[in-house]
């Protein structure tokens, strides 16, 4: 059965998009951590200077933003497993 272009029919595409978003957020978190420790230099004075609450806030916000993405990946994976189980029961 073919569903006309709905996102429900393609959970693997949604999962890949979420993984790409998560990879970008992890990259930003790692870059921020390396800049805070002084290993790398980020332009526009991001992560350099003294360690203050603002610098730790950036890392905390990046971690918080990653949580909904991780939860969404779990939901999409659960839908994908249920869809596969439904097709195997029909056969």
Image (cartoon, grey):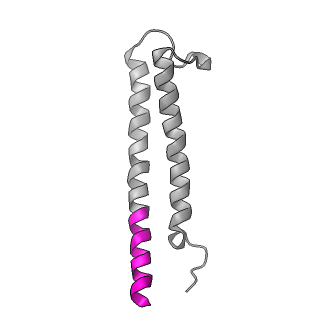
- The quadrant in which the N terminus is found is bottom right
Residue 49: in magenta span:
no
The secondary structure that most of the magenta stretch takes on is helix
Q: What residue is rendered at 40% in x and 82% in y?
A: 86
Q: What residue is rendered at 51% in x and 19% in y?
A: 35
- Residue 66 rendering spot, x and y as whole percentages: 43, 42
Question: In the figure, residue 65 lies in which quadrant?
Answer: top left
State the count of labels: 0
Q: What residue is rendered at 58% in x and 83% in y?
A: 2
Between 33 and 62, the one lying in front of the other is 33
* Residue found farthest to the top: 50
Question: In the figure, residue 74 lies in which quadrant?
Answer: bottom left
Q: Which residues are magenta?
A: 77-91
Between 87 and 21, the one lying in front of the other is 87
Residue 81: in magenta span:
yes
* Residue found farthest to the bottom: 91
Question: In the figure, residue 75 lies in which quadrant?
Answer: bottom left
- The quadrant in which the C terminus is found is bottom left
- Residue 40 rendering spot, x and y as whole percentages: 56, 18
Left or right: 71 as drawn, with respect to 39: left
Question: Taking 66 as reference, is 57 above or below it?
Answer: above
Question: Taking 41 as reference, is 15 above or below it?
Answer: below
Q: What residue is rendered at 49% in x and 25% in y?
A: 32
- Residue 64 rendering spot, x and y as whole percentages: 38, 38
Question: Taking 14 as reference, is 49 above or below it?
Answer: above
């Amino acid at each position: 059965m073919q569903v006309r272009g709905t996102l429900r029919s393609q959970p693997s595409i949604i999962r890949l998009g979420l993984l790409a978003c998560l990879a970008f957020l992890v990259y930003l978190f790692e870059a921020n951590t390396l800049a805070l420790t002084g290993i790398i230099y980020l332009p526009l004075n991001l992560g350099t200077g003294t360690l203050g609450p603002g610098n730790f806030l950036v890392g905390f916000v990046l971690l918080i933003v990653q949580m909904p993405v991780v939860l969404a990946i779990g939901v999409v994976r659960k839908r994908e497993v249920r869809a596969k189980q439904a097709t195997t029961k029909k056969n």
